[in-house]
Image: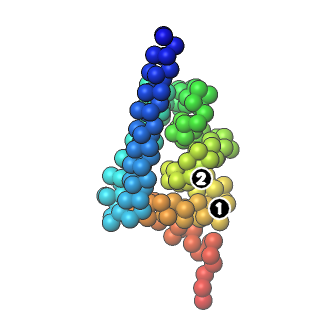
């Protein structure tokens, strides 16, 4: 009898949680679509913040606390603490893209471009639409002098977020070197 009630509770939990995940995914897809057609940078920034908020939901208070602590450490330039928090987060939740994104930012702040690029690859494997990770890939390739690869990454950002002024500026800066000058 106790087994049946446990199984029933488990099934009820699964049935309740499935629609919530589907609703969250649907909301995220709607926000991404709205971002791609945003009328201006202000609207795009508002939508981007909502998307990042959705991406930041780890589904575990402990993992969300590690994310918050890592971000807080980055904000005060405590790179070593940030690395510790994000490494713990990616160890315990390797399928959580925002943990990898935070780790990439911490590595970038520590001027460790190779590990940063590796962490960004993890982000993009988990979330190919992560415009922040694509921006980071572009910035690293640009810093490494790989202008064509940087340009390609920045172009991908603009397909997701057409009003990114930093990326538009980067494309303008790289355009002549990547595409050449027409006479």
Q: Which label is found at residue 22?
A: none
Residue 18 pos. (x, y %): 45, 37
Q: Secondary structure at mark 2?
A: helix
Q: Which residue position holds label 2? A: 137
| In front of the other: 2 or 47 | 2
Dot 1: what SS?
helix
Residue for point 58% across, 36% down: 95
- Please say whether residue 82 is visible from this viewpoint: yes
Can you give x and y, in whole percent of width and height, for residue 88 in the image? 58, 26
Mark sitting earlier along the chain (2/1):
2
What residue is shown with label 1?
A: 149
Q: Quadrant of the C terminus?
A: bottom right
Q: Quadrant of residue 105?
A: top right
Front residue of 70 and 17:
17
Between 177 and 138, the residue placed more toward the observer is 138
Decide: few, some or many residues near mark 2? Use Cα within 10 Å; few <14, some 14-19, many ≥20.
many
Direction from residue 109 to residue 40 in the image, left or right: left
Kindly check if marks 2 and 1 are in contact, taking CB atoms under 8 A apart as contact.
Answer: yes
Tell me the crowding category of disc 1: few under 14, some 14 to 19, or many 20 or more residues within 10 angstroms, Cα based: some
Give x and y (percent) for residue 150. 61, 60
Q: Height in image: 140 above or below 93? A: below
Q: Position of residue 14 (x, y in %)?
A: 47, 30
């Amino acid at each position: 009898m106790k087994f049946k009630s446990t199984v029933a509770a488990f099934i009820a939990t699964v049935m309740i949680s499935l629609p919530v995940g589907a609703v969250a995914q649907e909301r995220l897809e709607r926000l991404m679509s709205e971002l791609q057609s945003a009328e201006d940078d202000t609207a795009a920034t508002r939508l981007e913040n909502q998307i990042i908020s959705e991406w930041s939901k780890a589904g575990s208070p402990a993992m969300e606390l590690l994310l918050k602590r890592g971000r807080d450490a980055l904000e005060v330039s405590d790179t070593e603490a940030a690395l510790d928090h994000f490494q713990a987060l990616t160890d315990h939740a390797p399928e959580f893209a925002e943990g990898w994104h935070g780790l990439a930012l911490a590595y970038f702040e520590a001027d460790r471009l190779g590990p940063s690029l590796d962490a960004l690859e993890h982000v993009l494997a988990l979330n190919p639409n992560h415009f922040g990770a694509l921006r980071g890939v572009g910035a690293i390739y640009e810093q490494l002098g790989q202008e064509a690869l940087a340009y390609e990454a920045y172009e991908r950002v603009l397909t997701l977020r057409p009003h990114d002024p930093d990326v538009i500026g980067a494309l303008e800066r790289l355009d002549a070197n990547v595409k050449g000058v027409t006479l």
